[in-house]
Amino acid sequence: MIKGSVPLNSGVFDKVISKHKAVLVKFDETYPYGEKQEQFKKVAQSSYVQPELLIAEVQIADYGEQENMDLATRFNVKKEDFPVYKLFLQDKKEPIAYTGNVKDSAAIKRFVMKNTDLWLGMPGCLEDYDVLVKKFARASSEERQAILAEAEEIKNKYRNDVQKSYATIYVKTMKKIMEKDDFLASEMKRVEKLKDGKY
């Protein structure tokens, strides 16, 4: 059993799914293990902060009583594709299939955030600032000044030193973007070079 995740079976699947705004379901073998399962654990743990998101797991047995095989058939899940992630939204009839890397918890979380507008904590991120960044990206120069002032104000509410340091990075980045239009593009290139080992 994974903390932050609920096991589902054929008997309760529809009852549980229909009660939540968003449910990310992982369809997998009966005793999953390894790197893919470790990434699922990270996704499940990050959901603690989001009450409107349920993380669930359906374990499918292709032997014996073939437990939950009906769900695999219903949602077109094949054993060779395990694990398969599907996002069920309360206002949509069909689930949204995740087609990204199942060994990348950050990519799975981005998929959920993109399709739900729910916030899941990424390492080094703060929800207040992620909301401001979205406004900042669409804002005019004058509006950016007001958003920057709001960012400075929010920084004062954090007592935790780690969160304060994250807040400081958000504020510094906003200032640099205001000073230099191509800051983000040049910073992305710099980070790519670092990743590739080209200093």
Image (tube, grey):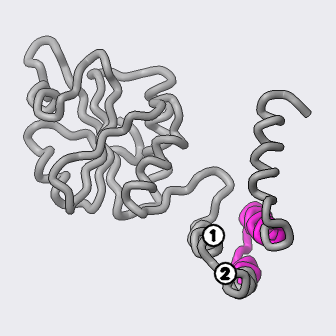
Furthest residue to the top? 63
Could you say which quadrant of the image residue 133 lies in? bottom right
Closer to viewer: mark 1 or mark 2: 2
Identify which amino acid the numbered label 2 is placed on.
Answer: Ser
The residue under the point 15% across, 12% down is: 63
Picture coordinates of residue 77, whole percent (x, y): 22, 27
Compared to residue 136, the image places residue 22 above or below, namely above
Residue at x-position 29% and y-position 51%: 23
- In the rendered structure, which segment of residues is drawn in magenta? 151-176
Relative to 34, say whether 133 is above or below. Answer: below
Q: For the point 41% across and 44% down, which residue is it?
A: 3
Q: Are marks 1 and 2 in contact (CB under 8 Å)?
A: no
Residue 69 location (% of width, % of height): 13, 25
Disc number at residue 19?
none
The residue lying toward the viewer, choosing from 34 and 126, is 126
Instruction: Determine the secondary structure under disc 2.
Output: loop
Residue 78 higher or lower than 145, as above or below = above
Name the residue tied to disc 2: 140
Residue under numbered circle 1 = 137
Q: Quadrant of the C terminus?
A: top right
Q: Crowding at label 1, few (<14), some or many (≥20) Cα neighbours within 10 Å?
A: few
Does residue 12 appear left or right of residue 114 in this picture?
Answer: left
Is 163 magenta? The answer is yes
Residue drawn at (55%, 56%), measured in percent from left and top?
A: 121
Residue 91 at what x, y percent from top left?
Answer: 20, 62
For label 1, the SS is helix
Residue 156 in sight from this viewpoint:
no
- What is the chief secondary structure element of the magenta stretch? helix
Q: Is residue 81 visible?
A: yes
Indicate left or right for 105 with 170 as reference: left
